[in-house]
Image (tube, coloured by chain):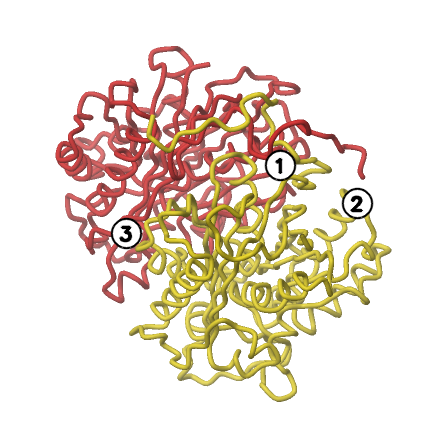
Chain colours: A red, B yellow
């Protein structure tokens, strides 16, 4: 047994302590799971939006020092993790496990951006929901005793996503008003149950999870992903409210990422049918990050980076300051590939809910 | 709070009980985590190999009743889960969370094959290591208290993988002897700490994990993935032996998936350099599943389905019967995409280690 061995909680029953299972894939987390630190890196367009002043770093160069769009996105993830570790006063060796993902085929941005850290790694894919998935799985890593410190990171890049899913940029295709604009950015988060050795103060705690179901409502329009994803968010929200025995008013904000303006309207209608009015609490990262009136971003921002950088730069500040005491954060993914789209398939959606509270 | 609510382990410290952290991303699991049941579905070629009689189901139709290769692979995953639930006497509603992945862009096989089960879902990507990743994360779901029953499923399909990564089948490209043959198949596993409500007897227990690091040794040959992955396996094995304080002799078998014959030779050399002789214990799922002499599969089988169906059909039988009391199962992924390959990038590897013991 190595020097670092330690026995944790050997006197207990097998399941995690301070965890209350309240439904299928739904848990209240009473044990400490802190978002100890976070970091955000964005591109120029994002820096010109309403949240522009809040991000840790702005990359003026679209290629982020790389030679390809994919390398650019890898570099965004790498920089987000470097800034995160620097803010926390940690080195990569201080982190037990890393959870990461992006939108590219075979999670290329993560696989090429993060290897050099040498942190034991679990790769994820949940489209734009991956940020919520990584925070959920990172919480479980702490609660199960696998890890003491976890890093969760996701990214997207406008140009690599357009290349992967739609048309070459040079083609200059028209975009309908329902289309979203993939955010160029990466957000990284450090989770731990303890502050030991971390120089910054914990920013918020994760107090619950509802794992999303894949919902296929037979929409097929890759230029209207809000419509494809809204039913999945509605499903997760309904399950969450029922499992936790709460109403929307339990939260200061219910934050999706990234439905955009079209998806938001559909979500309101779907929730109304289910008997919930979330119009007062609802906020969408895709709507917040750009100024639709002046930035030509149509329905709003999207991508694995959108809700990650919005959480890091904006949402956590609001929670930290106490302006919002408790929020339900529901990153939302459109599960399509260019192959499935070209084969005429539908676009299923998924929404991963994470309860984030002021400490 | 819903009817199903229950408090689990509220008297304990925050970390999981019966879990001993022995290194970065390495845990001994003393709490019960059982592989309660498993299922395997394969194609015709796999049924003609040395393990052919052991699989639960053989699909004679390459398209598995679908219209595209991707739909075929989705159907493999769906059938594997259906057989799994049937063998266990459960319905989909009895499962809390599902972890799944495949090799296709944006995990298309899982996203389209599994949605209809309605099981809360976490999507994964770790190339051929995904089977190990899913078993690891599934174990953590039980240990953390998120779930009482977890399904883990992975798949690959020869034709969808050739289309995704290499050439159209109609092109009839030559394959060097170092190339592997992607297995058409899907393996599914039911994990739980309890046998309550499950009609079959538990098959084995998961007794430890070592989470893999991404290792990039600057190999670039997508027709020699064994060479690309061997350094990652060597890294995981060395960390595992050190963290757990054991020698290779602690295991009846050390099972990689899927290095093939070329990767195996490289692994032996690399382990020899690190001071470990694993030649007596080593077995590779890619070498086992096909008869290289008669099936024209060159270095061996590969793909997310290869080690999953080999674990389900062969390895678990050997452990169950007591022929092997303890094995180290290390699914191994080559982290490339066709984009990264065409951009001249390297092929990093990752190996996810899972300790599987006789109950």
Of callouts 3 and 1, which one flags the residue occurring earlier in the amino acid sequence?
A: 1
- What residue is shown at x 35% (from left), y 50% (from top)? A161
Indicate whether A324 appears above or below B355: above
**Which residue was labeled with disc 1?**
A146
- Tell me if label 3 and label 2 are in contact, CB under 8 Å: no
Q: Which residue lies furthest to the right in this view?
A: B275
- Pinpoint the chain carrying mark 2: B
Percent coordinates x, y for residue B195 in the rendering: 53, 48
Q: In this view, does B310 lie above or below A178?
A: below
Distance CA(mark 3)–CA(mark 2):
44 Å
Choose between A13 and A340: the one closer to the eye.
A13
Question: Of the numbered discs in the image, which one, if any, rests on residue B157?
Answer: none
Q: How far apart are marks 3 and 1 (CA)?
A: 32 Å
SS for dot 2 = helix
Mark 3 burial class by Cα count in 10 Å: few <14, some 14-19, many 20+ = many
Are callouts 3 and 2 both on one chain? no
Residue positioned 55% across, 63% down in the render:
B308
The residue indicated by pointer 2 is B242
User: Residue B8, percent across and down?
Assistant: 51, 28
Q: What element carries label 3?
A: loop
Residue A36 seen anywhere in this rendered image of the structure: no
Q: Are marks 2 and 1 in contact (CB under 8 Å)?
A: no
The chain letter under disc 3 is A
Please provide percent x and percent y for residue A166. Answer: 28, 56
Q: In this view, does B92 lie to the left or right of B339?
A: left
Q: Position of residue B112 (x, y in %)?
A: 33, 59
> Which residue shows up at 47% across the image and 21% down it?
A205
Q: Which of A219 and B217 is in front in this view?
A: A219
Q: Which residue lies furthest to the top in this view?
A: A322
Task: From the image, tell me which residue sits under label 3.
Answer: A348
> Left or right: A17 with respect to B325?
left
């Amino acid at each position: 047994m190595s020097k670092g061995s330690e026995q944790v909680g050997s006197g207990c029953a097998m399941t995690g302590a301070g965890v209350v299972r309240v439904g299928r894939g739904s848990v209240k987390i009473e044990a400490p799971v802190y978002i100890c630190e976070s970091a955000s890196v964005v591109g120029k367009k994002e820096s010109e939006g309403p949240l522009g002043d809040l991000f840790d770093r702005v990359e003026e160069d679209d290629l982020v020092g790389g030679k390809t769009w994919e390398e650019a996105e890898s570099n965004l993830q790498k920089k987000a993790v470097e800034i995160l570790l620097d803010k926390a006063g940690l080195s990569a060796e201080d982190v037990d496990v890393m959870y990461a993902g992006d939108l590219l085929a075979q999670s290329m941005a993560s696989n090429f951006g993060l290897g050099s850290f040498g942190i034991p790694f679990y790769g994820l894919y949940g489209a734009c929901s991956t940020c919520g998935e990584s925070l959920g799985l990172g919480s479980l890593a702490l609660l199960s005793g696998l890890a003491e410190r976890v890093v969760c990171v996701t990214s997207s890049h406008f140009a690599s996503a357009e290349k992967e899913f739609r048309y070459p940029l040079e083609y200059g295709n028209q975009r309908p008003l329902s289309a979203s604009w993939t955010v160029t950015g990466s957000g990284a988060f450090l989770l731990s149950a303890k502050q030991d050795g971390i120089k910054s103060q914990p920013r918020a705690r994760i107090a619950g999870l509802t794992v999303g179901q894949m919902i296929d409502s037979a929409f097929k329009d890759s230029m209207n992903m809000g419509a494809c994803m809204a039913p999945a968010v509605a499903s997760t929200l309904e399950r969450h409210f029922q499992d936790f025995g709460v109403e929307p008013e339990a939260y200061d904000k219910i934050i999706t990422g990234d439905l955009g303006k079209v998806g938001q309207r559909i979500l309101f209608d779907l929730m109304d049918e289910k008997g919930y009015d979330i119009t007062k609490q609802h906020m969408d990262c895709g709507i917040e990050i750009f100024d639709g009136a002046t930035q030509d971003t149509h329905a709003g921002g999207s991508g694995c980076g959108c809700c990650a950088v919005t959480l890091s730069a904006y949402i956590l500040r609001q929670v930290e300051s106490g302006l919002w005491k408790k929020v339900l954060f529901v990153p939302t993914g459109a599960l399509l590939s260019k192959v499935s789209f070209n084969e005429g398939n539908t676009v299923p959606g998924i929404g991963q809910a994470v309860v984030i509270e002021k400490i």
